[in-house]
Amino acid sequence: MSISTLLQLPVVMCETATLVVFFGRFLGRKYNSKLPYILSSALYFVLNMTASTWFKEFVPLLTPLVCFALSLTLYNGTKTQRLFYSGLLVAYIFVAESFVMVALTFAFGRTMLEIAQMTTLFYLGAYSSKVLLLILAFVVSGRRKTRVKPVPFTYHLFLLFIVCICAGLSVGDMVLVAASGEPATLMHLLFETAFLLLSVLVFFVFEKFQSYAEHELQTTMIEQQLAKNELLFETIESQHTEIRAIKHDMVNHLTSIGVLADNGQVAELQDYIGEYIKDSQAVMSPTITGRPSVDAIITEKRLFAEQENIRFGIVFDELSDVLVNPVHLNIILSNALDNALDACRALSTQPERKRYIELQLKTEPGFLLMRVSNSSPEVSTNDGEFPITSKAEKNLHGFGLASIKRVVERNRGVMFCEYKDGEFVFMAQIFNSKVNT
């Protein structure tokens, strides 16, 4: 094994570690198993070492290509988010390498060409740039180990644009030093330092933008939830109004029934009772769970399903003793059923597909279990939680499951989503206890 190969080993190892840290912290792993990440890291290590030995002209292209390939296949987030963080890492690679090379020419008084011809000094620079890149990855990612925040694409584009400008200026400064045939001056080093610091500082400005955007999204989510609750309350109020009307008319109905019975008008009596039952069922919930608010939601969603020829089934336990905050329970149930209805509506152009929704509400000692399964177009999920939306305006969707997740966690529960064989399944398990709104 040659000296160059030995010197290249720590450089490639450091760069591989940087990719794992950067994407793992910002995007989160898509798979629970560590095997795909171990294999991909090993493959990249072999490719990089091979290219460094036999195809050195392709080394500058290898890392950017691997960045995009890894982010798109092994990590979470929308495609836009994964492309964004790939581009961000590539820009940081160029900034780190340019800064280190200019710093070396200034510190040792050598030209770029001389450094390239000095094996030890060249690999010292290469290793230093990878260490600097790893430090940058830790600095900008902090202790983050959660998935990327769902902020609008324009915020990502702004940061990427600024960092790419910094990278371009940094590389341009290095090229000027190389073209001059002289060692870098203090001014060149100061320029490189400024570009490096700006590329990092702008990221923290971006973090502020993220917080602002997240606040806007939460506000929109709350407004949507309030609109749903308003519709639900209007439905309940309408039902109560009709029930009061039925109660008011009960005396008249009983009088009419009594007259028909006394006169022996059996056929007319049967018709009258049949019409009365039909009118009553239109406003009385056929599902009696023991929780009126739950009955109202189920009745409303089942009515929507029946109007669109979607089969709606329900299996439930008595819920009158459930201690879960009724507002929390309604948020989970209404959003889960709304998502199921949307999925079934998306199959309206596929008449061969059966459209159905199955709701299960089960109680176990200390827990309430909720399960909604429905026919659905193909979707992908992140770690068993959030499906990746296929809608064009991704930032304006997904609030339903976000609301569910927030409420489930407040009730010390867990949720799970899965798509398999044309069926989407949502499950939540929450503690059967009182939690303040």
Image (spheres, rainbow, N blue to C red):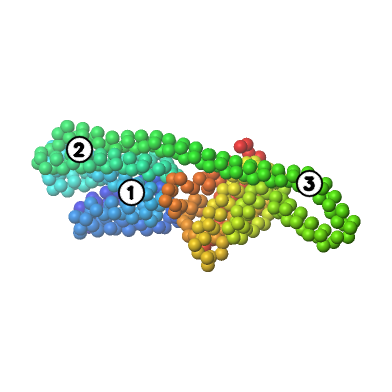
Which residue is labeled 3 in the image?
A: 249
Q: Residue at x 42, y 40 (%)?
A: 143
The location of residue 302, given as percent across then percent down, is: 63, 54
- In the picture, residue 113 is in which quadrant? top left
**Local secondary structure at mark 3:** helix
Q: Residue at x 63, y 50 (%)?
A: 300
Figure quadrant of the N terminus? bottom left
Q: Nearer the viewer, residue 52 or 155?
A: 155
Reading the chain from its start, which is encountered first: label 1 or label 2?
A: 1
Q: Is residue 98 visible?
A: no
Q: Residue at x 81, y 60 (%)?
A: 268
* Pointer 2 local density, CA inside 10 Å: few below 14, some 14–19, many at least 20: many
Q: Nearer the viewer, residue 297 or 206?
A: 297
Which residue is labeled 1 in the image?
A: 86
Residue furthest left in the image = 181
Name which residue type carries label 2. Ala
* Pointer 3 local density, CA inside 10 Å: few below 14, some 14–19, many at least 20: few
Name which residue type carries label 3. Asp
In the rendered structure, the answer to whether residue 391 lies left or right of residue 154 reads right
In the rendered structure, the answer to whether residue 27 lies left or right of residue 130 reads right
Residue 425 vertical position relative to residue 148 in the rendered view, above or below: below
**Local secondary structure at mark 1:** helix
The location of residue 230, given as percent across then percent down, is: 60, 41
Name which residue type carries label 1. Ser
Marking on residue 149: none
The CA distance from mark 1 to mark 2 is 26 Å
Q: Nearer the viewer, residue 317 or 23?
A: 317
Which residue is labeled 2 in the image?
A: 103
The CA distance from mark 1 to mark 3 is 69 Å
Residue 186 vertical position relative to residue 126 in the rendered view, above or below: above
**Local secondary structure at mark 2:** helix
